[in-house]
Amino acid sequence: MRLRLLRLNTCSPKRFCDRIRVEHPGKPVIVGGVHVSSCAEPVEPFDAKIQGPGELALMQILREGVIQGYTYNVPVDDLNSLPLPAYELIEPSRYHHTIEGQKAIGVMVTRGCPYSCVFCSKSTHGRKVLRIDIKRIEDLLVKVYFYGWTALNFHDDNLMLDKNYLKELCEMLSKYRFIWRCWARTDHVTLDALKMMKAAGCREIGFGIESGSQLILTA
Ligand code: SF4
């Protein structure tokens, strides 16, 4: 069995699923991700769906085949137990996100967030925070650099959550010439952390701001 992995945001999953079936007849179509994990919609029109993280669920599917109509939910408890992504299979020319003109690849070194912002779905990774060891991230970045990326787009929910981990990460990143961006909460910002991040190559931080209106925030 050969699995094709896609990430999509679409208002018409049935139409998208139909198109995949036309282009890949006879192949199982499995859906997953944040939207699927946060709603209890039926599996149809897909063959199966994955709620929560996908790695171990996909390995189970590869081992045992797809159970038609089944919702897979196989948690990942240790990010360090997962193999590094196969960057050698990714073609940089097909990626168009840049930071200061440099091609940026998405990376994620933590999962989960302990907060409960009402507008956020954490149904995929939950409240428990998991982290990849810094040495392992360094192995990953060496691989990323080897395959041509010089900019990193950290997709972690909140890279500034744990200042000790952030410090270790920045110290490691300072050895290389990557530039990068990340997401964080505004109440985790400190001047020291910003200076440390800038020195380590950070060029941009995205903040999730629910509303500019206090009325809506307290509603
Ligand atoms: S801090 Fe970010 S990831 Fe965490 S609950 Fe709020 S919006 Fe979601």
Image (cartoon, grey):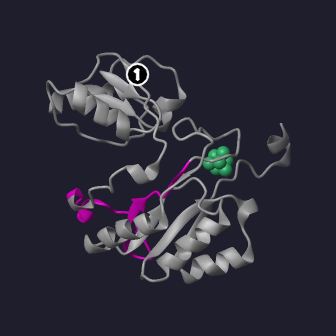
Q: Image quarter for residue 4? A: top left
Q: Which span is picked out in magenta?
A: 89-111
Q: Quadrant of the N terminus?
A: top left
Q: Position of residue 142 (x, y in %)?
A: 33, 73
Residue type at numbered disc 1: Thr
Dot 1: element: strand
* Number of numbered discs on residues: 1
The location of residue 99, given as percent across then percent down, is 44, 72
Is residue 148 something one can see in this rendering? yes
Residue visible at 71% across and 48% down in the picture: 210
Of residues 198 and 25, the one drawn nearer to the viewer in this rendering: 198
**Residue 162, quarter of picture:** bottom right
Q: Is residue 191 magenta?
A: no
- For residue 31, what is the image quadrant? top left
Residue 132 in the image, given as x and y percentages of width and height: 48, 58
Which one is in front, 217 or 153? 153
Look at the image and say whether residue 92 sits in the magenta stretch: yes
Residue, x 26% and y 23% (percent of image)?
Answer: 66
Residue 86 in the image, given as x and y percentages of width and height: 26, 56
| Picture layout, residue 63 above or below residue 79 | above
On the picture, is 50 further left or further right than 109? left
